[in-house]
Amino acid sequence: MAFRASALGFAATFMAAGCEAAPTEGEASGAMVKVRTQQFTDRPIPRFEVDAAWPDLPDDLMLGQIPGLAVDGNDNVWILQRPNSLGFSDTGLDQNPPIAVCCRAAPHVMKFSQEGALLDAWGGEEHAPKIGGVSQWPANVHGLFVDAENTIWIGGNGDGDHVVLNLTSDGEFIRSVGRRKETAGNFDRDTLGNPADIAPGGEGEILIADGYINKRIIGFDEAGEFTRFWGAYAASPDDETRAGAFDQSQASSNADGGADPESKNFGDIVHCVVKGPNDRIYVCDRRNNRLQVFQTGDDGETVFLQDIVFAPETGGIRTVSDVAFSPDNAFMYVSDMMNGQVWILDAKTYEFLGAIGRNGRYPGEFIWLHSVDVDSDGNIYTTEVNTGRRVQKFVFTGVK
């Protein structure tokens, strides 16, 4: 029988089981900064410091919004960022003629070593084909996945971005799913509607959080053939899609009446799909402040397991934006966009154990926290969009 887990309400967010949270204010020690940490139970939790000098970005490059993050099997850190989110005052060297001593827009896709060295960077229309005269490179990139073969998957949520691209690690086009400028709703098995995220499914299957125009999870096999789709609670997707193109102001609107963690349907941003331990599939229903957990049955059908609700009163840009797991699969990390923190849960029971971070612009703080991932040493990486526009590394210091 499915059951629910929920984050504490606002009044008790930082107090649980009679234990008062113990925030630690940011305290610099060289390049390392202690992280504001809340502990909700007596159980020890992972602890972190922020490496404020990470990454080592070339002096003339500027990062924009960063809506994609992935750590590959070699602990390289990949980010997907938006040069189009930068203005003229950010990119004076790119103007013709140049109008400032710095900077240039960084490329869309960037690969860093675990230590923060820039190893590779590429992106743009030259990396995707034209179909019917339409470039398949997204107008506004969103979502990044690096698979076991070290190939790159990229989505998009701009006007007409109804495509997922698959490329080699150096940017050579392999294939695509969907097509820009073509969308046909939640029941169509060939087209997409502003895909937000990508994850592995079953053997040879790719799952897509088709979530800014459509509201569903959809799967395709290695040949690009449809495998399955589902909506909330593993039911058939509903027939409602976003009318017109998505713009970022819709992400913070409360015109929908607010989050409904008990809704029978996904909200209008299905933001992430992540494959976790024991092949469970986690879906970020961000606008409803919940994570839905699924698994694939022996018959190949999707089975709903449970809701995990995060700070249900939260409005604005809402909560659940991404999910990651500690290397030993003991802890689950969930990024909370509106509340500017990473929740720490027991990865098996989904008990809420603590959180790190807060809203803010200093190291260890977040503005529009978008993505989270973890390397094999337990270090956490995060990225931010809107005016956040950065990637951070949280160095694991032990479970205490």
Image (cartoon, grey):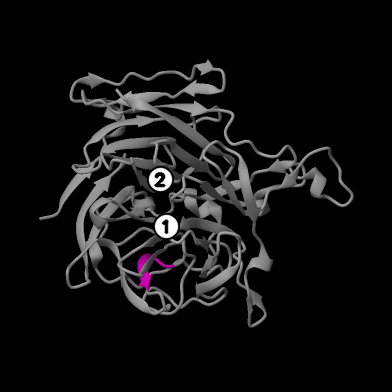
* Residue name at image x 27 percent, y 38 percent: 345
Q: Residue furthest right?
A: 97
Name the residue that disc number 2 marks: 318
Residue 316 visible at all: no
Local packing at callout 2 (Cα closer than 10 Å; few below 14, some 14-19, many 20+) is many
Q: Residue furthest left?
A: 1
Q: Is residue 393 toward the left or the right of residue 129 in the image?
A: left
Secondary structure beneath dot 1 equals loop
Secondary structure beneath dot 2 equals loop
Residue 291 visible at all: yes
CB contact under 8 Å: marks 2 and 1: yes
Local packing at callout 1 (Cα closer than 10 Å; few below 14, some 14-19, many 20+) is many
Magenta range: 214-220
In magenta segment, residue 360: no
Q: Quadrant of the C terminus?
A: top left
Q: Amino acid at mark 1?
A: Ile
368 or 69, nearer to the observer: 69
Name the residue that disc number 1 marks: 269
The chief SS type of the magenta part is strand
In the drawing, what numbered circle is on residue 332?
none
Q: Amino acid at mark 2?
A: Arg
From the top left corner, tell me how far across and down residue 175 is, in percent: 52, 73
